């Protein structure tokens, strides 16, 4: 069974109504995104950081997967599909995708500030100051913040290097290290880039541009791949 690796970004979730991470030119209530999504922000203004993620989490409980998410699931009938997502939502999982790797963390999960291996899933949207783990330390969003390493990137590189087909959806391909994953895909491997603003990427061979939103471009590509299998 051929392996399809899919890299998704904010664009595919935006079609479900999820606010993108850099809405309004990277501003959020007159704060730059780095000021509400970094270790320094957590130390200096914990309440603001909690509010930012609480509002994003609340929104996530109100939205549903779109056609882009749903059509990717159909590929699992004929292919081994691994999704690598830059998104922190759970829309791929809710659509039915069975293999999803989150590069930047997961919005519905929180973790201990004392032991990062203690990770919990929330069944509600609000995380408060004073919500502690079993060790008695404050819980924080299970998110990779600015200035923090991306712990899953090596795993993602390994997965990308095994792709028989590589698909990019809804990302600008300028946010690193995620954007570098395509460089680890074999030169002869077919690659597809689905995004309204997609352009050719220097040095990348066998790249096919589908200049459409995920909700339109994904069904189109999936239909072709299923017929071809």
Image (tube, helix red, strand yellow):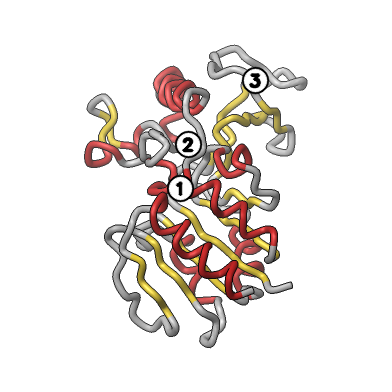
As measured in the structure, the alpha-carbon distance from the residue carrying label 2 to the one carrying label 3 is 25 Å
- Residue hosting label 3: 123
**Which percent across, then down, holds residue 129?**
54, 14
Q: Residue shown at 62%/73% (left/top)?
A: 163
Q: Nearer the viewer, residue 80 or 113?
A: 80
Please give the residue where the numbered disc 2 appears in the rendered image.
39
Residue at 25 percent across and 34 percent down: it is 27
| Picture coordinates of residue 55, whole percent (x, y) | 43, 22
From the image, tell me which residue sits under label 1: 147
Dividing the image into 4 quarters, which one contains the C terminus? bottom right
**Against 42, is 82 above or below?**
below
Check disc 1: other Cα within 10 Å, few if <14, some if 14-19, many if 20+: few
Q: Pointer 2 and pointer 1: residues touching (CB < 8 Å)? A: yes
Seen as rendered, the residue at the extreme front is: 227
Tag shown at residue 196: none
Residue 57: image location, x then y, percent: 49, 25
Left or right for 223, reference 112: left
Q: Is residue 43 visible?
A: no
- In front here: 179 or 117? 179
* Any part of residue 168 in sight: yes
How far is the residue under mark 3 from the one under mark 1? 28 Å
């Amino acid at each position: 069974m051929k392996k399809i690796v899919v890299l998704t970004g904010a664009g595919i979730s935006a079609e479900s109504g999820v606010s993108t991470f850099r809405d309004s030119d990277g501003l959020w209530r007159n704060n730059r995104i780095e000021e509400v999504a970094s270790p320094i922000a957590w130390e200096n203004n914990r309440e603001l950081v909690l509010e930012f993620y609480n509002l994003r989490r609340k929104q996530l409980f109100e939205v549903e997967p779109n056609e882009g998410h749903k059509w990717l699931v159909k590929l699992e009938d004929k292919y081994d599909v691994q999704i690598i997502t830059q998104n922190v939502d759970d829309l791929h999982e809710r659509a039915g995708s069975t293999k999803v790797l989150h590069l930047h963390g997961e919005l519905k999960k929180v973790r201990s500030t004392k032991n990062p291996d203690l990770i919990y899933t929330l069944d509600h949207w609000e995380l408060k100051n004073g919500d502690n783990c079993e060790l008695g330390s404050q819980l924080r969003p299970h998110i990779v913040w600015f200035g923090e390493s991306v712990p899953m990137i090596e795993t993602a590189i390994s997965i990308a290097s095994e792709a028989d087909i590589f698909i990019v959806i809804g990302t600008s391909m300028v946010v690193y290290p995620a954007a570098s994953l395509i460089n680890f895909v074999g030169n002869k491997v077919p690659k597809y880039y689905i995004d309204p603003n997609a352009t050719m990427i220097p040095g990348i061979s066998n790249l096919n541009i589908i200049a459409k939103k995920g909700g339109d471009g994904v069904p189109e590509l999936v239909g072709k791949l299923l017929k071809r299998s």
